[in-house]
Every structure is written in C-alpha cells, then in structure tokens.
C-alpha cells in the first residue's frame, strides 16, 4: 500500500509540472534559509558547551563598589584569590587561571619568521578544567615547567610550517632563555569564548617583580579565573565563601568593597555586556530571537504556499477523490495518500536545500565570521533537527489539505458542486495576508537597518577618519625615539601630518578612565576618559579647538597641561580655559580605579569640540586630553595622515617600515587604517543587514511564487467567465483589473497589520544607538508600494494571458 501511495504521488508530481515546480522551489528556498539560520543559531547557543564539564565551570567576576557607591563588574581576580580558594573550598575540583601581560616578538631560533604575539600565562592545571583537544603533548604536564608553551596548530604552522613541533624551541623578547613547545592544540572551535595563540606557563615569569606581585595580590583584577566545581556543589555557597576570604585578606586601606560572583561558563557569551575585561566574542539574544522568528516565518511561508495551491486545486482531483471513495477508499486512505504526496515533495525539497546549503556555507561563514559545517561529521543534534524539520514541514504543508480533500463527499464531487465554501477561500486569503505581513515587515526592517548604517557612516563624528594610518608602538626603543620617527615620517611626500597618542578614536583596547576633581574641591570625582597626545594630534585628526590653546611644541613645558572636550567642560563648569586646575588622583585601565603614585594636578589650557571616540551606540562622554608626557598613560601609537590625491600608500608603508628598522630591527611595522577599524564597531549590524536583506528577498520570492500559482489557477478556473465577459464587450484592462483585485486586497490588509509590528520592533532596535534615525511614515508607505507592485507584477502576467486569450476556445466545449 505504501509503495502504491508513492507511485501515485510521483505520478501526480510529473503530471502537474508547473505547480510541482512552484511547491518544490518554494519549499527548497524556505528550507535552505531555515537551515543556514539554524546552523548559525545552533553555533551561538552552544558557545563553550563542547567541554565535558561545562555545566560545572564558572568564571570568577569581581563586583567592586567604590567609595562613591559605583559598581563595576570585572572579569578577573587577584592571584591569591584562586590559589587560596582551591585549598580552602572542597567544592572546587579544578581551577584554570590566565593573564595577558602584553605583546612580544615570537620567533624561531634562527629568526627566520617573527610574529608579534600576546604573552598569555596559564597555571599548571589549566587544562584540568577545559577539554581543549591536544594534537601533541599531554594536558597534565604541558604547563608545569618554566619556559614552556602550548600553541595552536595554526600558530605552529605559521612558525614552522607544520604542526609536528613538540619539543622544538622558540624565543621571545621577554628574556634570552629559549621556550620549549610542550603541547599543540587543535585550533579552537569558532564558538569558544576562550581563545589564544600561545599559552606560556606561569613559572616562565622568573623575575622578582612578577613573583612579588602575585605573592600579595588579593585586590587586582588581572587574572581571568575559572573554577571547576564538583557535581552537586552550590555555587552560591562558594561565592559567599570566596567573598569572605577576600575580605579577610585584602588591603583594608583600599576604599570600597569587593564581592565575588561565579558566572556559569555557558552564560558568558550572552551575558557579559556589562562586564569589563571581557575581550571574548559577545552574543546577542535579541539577534537570536529575531533570526529564529524570521527563519520560521520564511519556512512557514513556503508551507503556506503548498497548502494554498493544494487546497485551491482540489477541483482538478475531484473525480479522482470521488472514484476512490466510491470503490471503497476510506478517509484515512485518502489522508495517507495526500500526506505521502506532501512528504515526497518535502523530501525532494530538503535534498535540494541541503545541496544549496552546502554550496553557500563557505560564503555564509565568511561574512558571519563563523566556522559552520554540514556533513557526516556534523553534530548529531543538527542531523536529528534536519530529520525533524522534514517531518514537521511535511505535516505542516500536507496535513490541512489532506484532511480537507479527504473529507469531501463523493456524490457532490461527481456533480461538480463546489464544496470549498467561503470559509476555505477566506482561509486561503488569510494565509496570503500572513505571507505578505512577514514580507512587508522584513522590507521595513531591511530599510531601517540600511538607513541607520548609512546614517552612522555619514554622521559628523567630530574628526576625519579617512586617510589615517595607525601604527602600533611595540617596543621601548621606538617609544623613546618617537620624536625622531615622527619627524622622519613627516618628511615623506605621501604624508600630510603625524601624531603620537596613548590611544586613538575607535580604540579596540580599553580606553582608560580617570577620576577628575575640579579646583572647587567637589566632594565626588567625575569619571572621564583620558588620552595622552602631542601637539600634532588636533591637526592630524582635524579636531577643532574651540577655546584656549593647543599644546606647545616644546613638550617639557606642557607636561602638566591638559585639554578637555566640551562635555568635560560642561561637567566641570569650566567656561573659559584660563588656568583652572583639575586633580586626577586615580586611573582605571579596565578594572577598578587605582591611585596614581601622586595625584596629577593639571592646568586646563584649552577646550576642544566634542568628537566621538567610541561606537555611535555610546553617547558622547567627557574626556581629558593630556600632553604626551603626562603621568597617567604613555604613548602607544603613531597616527599618520596621508596626503590627499594619488598617494602611493604601499610606497609610504614601505618607507615607514624602513624608518622603523633604523630604530628597532626586531619589530615589524604593525598598522591598520582607522576607517576600517571604525567599521568593525558595526560589523554585527552589517551581518544582520545582509541576512535581513537576503531573507527579505527570498520571503518575497516565495510569496510571489504562491501568488503566481494561485493566480494561474484562478485564471484557469475562470476561463469560461472571462470568455463570456469578452464576448459581452469587456475590455482587456477591465478583465485584468477584475482578476488582479482579488490578490491586491490581501496585500493591502497585510500592510495595515505589518506596519505597527514593524514600527515597534525596529524602534526597539534603534534604541540601542545613542545616535539614530527616526522611523518615518514614508518608510511604511514605500514598503507597501513595493509589496503592491510586486503582487501586481506577479499576478498581471497570468491575468493578461487570460484576458487576451481567444474566447471561442474557452467557450467551445463545456
């Protein structure tokens, strides 16, 4: 019987090629979209869950409250906190600790290849907590000895051209002792929040300075710390115990209080936006929800197409259904037959969808920055999901048409009486409305995202970010010779101006903040960002000096002078920079505020125009700009403004490298273009924009396929009516209007339903930006016009074909 069902189903697919093509194409597109988005969402939701003990691993997060009552959450603790906790608390089964000290040159012993890499240290039992896969070496002793390192296979290939490097040695700028490779890790999964190229053993730091620091470190936030708790342990109890331990041992002279919280490893990806010191990949649950809804809607639209076309075309199979019933076919037999047809169509569509997904995955990965894969080695849960989707899509597409057609009465069918009452027609129209509600919503969403991204690109941010090359200062030799290098850079014909600074606008590292007290002796300090710059900074970045003066070329005379931006001037009640003094007693480099060796008493000499130095998601903030030789933060970058015109950028970079080599041959020129760096702020928004645009186009395409099928069938069913109308004098335009208006009404209703939903959703998204566009009425009008135009174009083809047909042919036979 089952074989017979499939034979009949296959025969019907072949006999109705046009409608079969529409159904299969719609389901293929819908399923392909769903699979791609599902792979993306699965990757996001399984962040850090590949470790065996993920559910028992917790990250230590310091909750620090300063004397002003301000709370700061920091992803780090002092060294002694983890050392003492693993001894005092039996609930702690393992502990992983890491700290990044900066960057150094890493090279083979013969200096054939040199790379600038971070010095990240790990404790001896780091890999007891985590299950990163070792290709070479063993986790138990990989970090136990001094001057040893574990690296990823990618780093091994970069240095040696092979991953077979166990026992080989490298050298760094930290000291002259070679470092032995004791382990090679398989490259980290794309959904790991812990990522490094090289992990050195803690004992590699043999200097007295580091040893003295860690021996008394209860208060810093320098060490990222993870605790592996035993099964059934209560993390709240461990939190309270460690908090009490810190209170007993921390320096009582430091104001404020510290409480430690344990954050589940599985929560880090989505719940770390308010935690400082977290440099990992941060996800957005809102994005997951939106993508999930969009993916399901696109798939549902494809299923609706199948339902609509199948129920609309029931009359073509009326006699078949009637004969089957007369000769004894039960309602259950017919239901199974029609479900078999739906499942056969779905399986064919799923096969095509898998092929399309496999082909498009490399492109999809490139712009989503993922490592998604679909194949035999794919996670079994994804394969089970594909099987489940096949069943769900088959049932969703075929169950309603199967039940409706199987319930029809044979006698009425034989007499050609229409049993598809107005309720059924209304249902089909409702489904068309739903299709276009989704399509119009996505048109509006795509439009708003595009306009917001365009606004961010074109907004005046207070400085010119084009033509700027930022060069890292990676050694003491370069830092000490900055004036020489700056002067040599300035002599290049491709260079307009050069500046040095501690940080740059669009900074990817932490921008330091300082606590600022004005001369009037305010009871509480005001938090402001801080930059250290030279006298060329304003010119290089084209930042306007509003009042006062710039720094003098003679840097020694301005070491205690500062500029402030307009926001800082307003916060400090400074109208004219006429020698007012401000006091900066402490600085925060991404953790809590630490006191300076002595308070920095600075004289305000100028006020600059506000400029954006962070993402435009953030509002303008007060900033203090100190001279390059300030006591708060040393210089870390050169910024080179290239000359306008046909500048040979490659030639300029080559000359700059040569200038660098004259000062320090051990370091390569590390640079990037600031406008490209600035765009990284919005890369996830651009990913959303691209996905929404593609999904919108495909959702519209699927909806149009449905309209095309329904309009084709409607024209077939009304062919005699059209013939009679033409004989009686109806014009082609009148007939086209008659056939088209039935399909335009649902689109108009969809506009009314989709508009408020789209307004609320996109307004909520825009609230995440400090600088944003505002949604206007014309956006909905334009989206509606696009939807109506698409519907008319889709339907008019069949309408014109039916209206221009020879009426004699349609009226010749009954």
Image (tube, grey):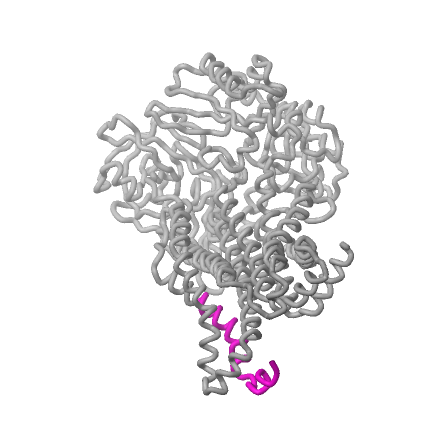
Going 26% across and 33% down the picture, which residue do you hit?
581
Residue 304, percent across and down?
56, 58
Going 65% across and 65% down the picture, which residue do you hit?
20
Of residues 34 and 79, the one nearer the viewer is 34
Q: Is residue 174 above or below residue 455?
A: above
| Dominant SS type (magenta) | helix
- Is residue 803 highlighted in magenta? yes
Residue 609, percent across and down?
30, 48
Residue 256, percent across and down?
38, 21
Of residues 41 and 462, the one nearer the viewer is 41
Instruction: For residue 130, say whether it is visible.
Output: yes
- Is residue 455 highlighted in magenta? no
Residue 712, percent across and down?
57, 72
Question: Which range of residues does the magenta coloring cover?
Answer: 786-814
Instruction: For residue 349, say whether it is visible.
Output: no
- Give the position of the C terminus as an image quadrant: bottom right
Tell me where residue 813 sits by quadrant: bottom right
């Amino acid at each position: 019987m089952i074989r017979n069902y499939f034979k009949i189903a296959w025969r019907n697919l072949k006999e109705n090629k046009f409608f079969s093509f529409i159904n299969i194409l719609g389901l293929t597109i819908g399923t392909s979209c769903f699979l791609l988005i599902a792979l993306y969402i699965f990757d996001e939701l399984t962040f850090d869950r590949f470790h065996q003990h993920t559910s028992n691993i917790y990250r230590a997060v310091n909750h620090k409250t300063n004397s002003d009552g301000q709370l700061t959450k920091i992803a780090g603790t002092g060294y002694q906190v983890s050392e003492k906790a693993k001894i005092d608390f039996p609930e702690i089964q393992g502990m992983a600790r890491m700290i990044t000290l900066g960057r150094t040159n890493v090279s083979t012993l013969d200096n054939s290849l040199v790379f600038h890499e971070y010095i990240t240290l790990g404790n001896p039992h780091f890999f007891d907590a985590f299950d990163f896969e070792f290709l070479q070496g063993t986790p138990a002793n990989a970090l136990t000895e001094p001057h040893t390192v574990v690296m990823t296979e990618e780093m091994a290939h970069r240095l040696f051209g092979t991953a077979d490097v166990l026992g080989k040695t490298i050298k760094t700028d930290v000291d002259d002792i070679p470092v032995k490779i004791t382990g090679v890790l398989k490259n980290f999964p794309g959904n790991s929040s812990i990522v490094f190229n090289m992990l050195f053993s803690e004992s590699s730091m043999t200097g007295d300075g580091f040893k003295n620091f860690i021996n008394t470190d209860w208060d810093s936030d320098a060490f990222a710390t993870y605790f592996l708790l035993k099964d059934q342990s209560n993390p709240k109890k461990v939190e309270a115990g460690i908090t009490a331990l810190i209170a007993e041992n921390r320096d009582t002279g430091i104001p404020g209080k510290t409480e430690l919280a344990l954050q589940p490893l599985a929560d880090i990806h989505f719940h770390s936006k308010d935690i400082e010191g977290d440099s990992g990949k941060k996800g957005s649950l809102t994005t997951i929800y939106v993508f999930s809804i969009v993916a399901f809607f696109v798939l549902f639209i494809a299923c609706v197409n199948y339902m609509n076309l199948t129920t609309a075309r029931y009359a073509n199979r009326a006699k078949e259904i009637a004969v089957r019933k007369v000769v004894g076919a039960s309602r259950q037999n017919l239901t199974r037959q029609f479900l078999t047809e739906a499942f056969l169509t779905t399986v064919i569509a799923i096969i095509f969808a898998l092929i399309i997904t496999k082909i498009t995955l490399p492109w999809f990965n490139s712009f989503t920055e993922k490592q998604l894969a679909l194949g035999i080695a794919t996670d079994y849960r994804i394969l089970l999901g594909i099987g489940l989707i096949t069943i769900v899509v088959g049932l969703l597409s075929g169950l309603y048409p199967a039940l409706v057609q199987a319930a029809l009465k044979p006698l009425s069918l034989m007499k050609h009486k229409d049993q598809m009452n107005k309720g059924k027609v209304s249902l089909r129209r409702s489904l068309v409305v739903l299709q276009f509600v989704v399509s119009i919503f996505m048109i509006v969403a795509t439009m708003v995202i595009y306009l917001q991204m365009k606004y961010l690109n074109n907004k005046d941010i207070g400085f010119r970010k084009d033509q700027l090359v930022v060069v890292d200062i990676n050694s003491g030799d370069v830092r000490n010779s900055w004036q020489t290098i700056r002067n040599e850079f300035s002599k290049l014909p491709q260079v307009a101006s050069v500046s040095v600074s501690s940080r740059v606008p669009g900074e990817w590292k932490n921008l330091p903040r300082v606590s600022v007290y004005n001369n009037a002796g305010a009871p509480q300090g005001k938090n402001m960002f801080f930059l250290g710059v030279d006298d060329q900074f304003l010119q290089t970045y084209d930042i306007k000096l509003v009042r006062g003066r710039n720094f003098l070329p003679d840097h020694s005379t301005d070491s205690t002078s500062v500029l402030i931006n307009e926001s800082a001037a307003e916060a400090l009640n400074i109208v004219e920079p006429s020698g007012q003094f401000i006091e900066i007693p402490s600085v925060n480099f991404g953790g809590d505020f630490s006191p300076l060796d002595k308070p920095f008493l600075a004289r305000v000499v100028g006020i600059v125009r506000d400029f954006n130095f962070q993402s435009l998601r953030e509002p303008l903030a007060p900033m203090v700009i100190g001279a390059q030789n300030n006591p708060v933060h040393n210089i870390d970058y050169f910024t080179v403004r290239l000359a306008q015109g046909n500048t040979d950028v490659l030639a300029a970079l080559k000359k700059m490298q040569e200038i660098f080599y004259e000062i320090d041959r051990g370091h390569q020129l590390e640079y990037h273009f600031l406008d490209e760096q600035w765009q990284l702020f919005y890369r996830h928004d651009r990913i959303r924009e691209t996905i929404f645009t593609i999904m919108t186009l495909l959702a519209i395409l699927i909806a149009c396929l449905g309209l095309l099928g329904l309009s084709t069938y409607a024209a077939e069913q009304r062919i005699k009516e059209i013939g009679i109308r033409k004989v009686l004098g109806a014009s082609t335009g009148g007939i086209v209007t008659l056939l088209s208006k039935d399909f335009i009404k649902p689109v108009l209703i969809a506009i009314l339903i989709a508009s408020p939903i789209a307004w609320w959703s996109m307004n909520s998204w825009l609230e995440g930006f400090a600088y944003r566009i505002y949604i206007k009425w014309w956006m909905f009008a334009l989206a509606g016009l696009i939807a109506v135009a698409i519907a008319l174009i889709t339907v008019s083809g069949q309408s014109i074909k039916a209206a221009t047909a020879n009426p004699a042919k349609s009226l010749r036979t009954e």
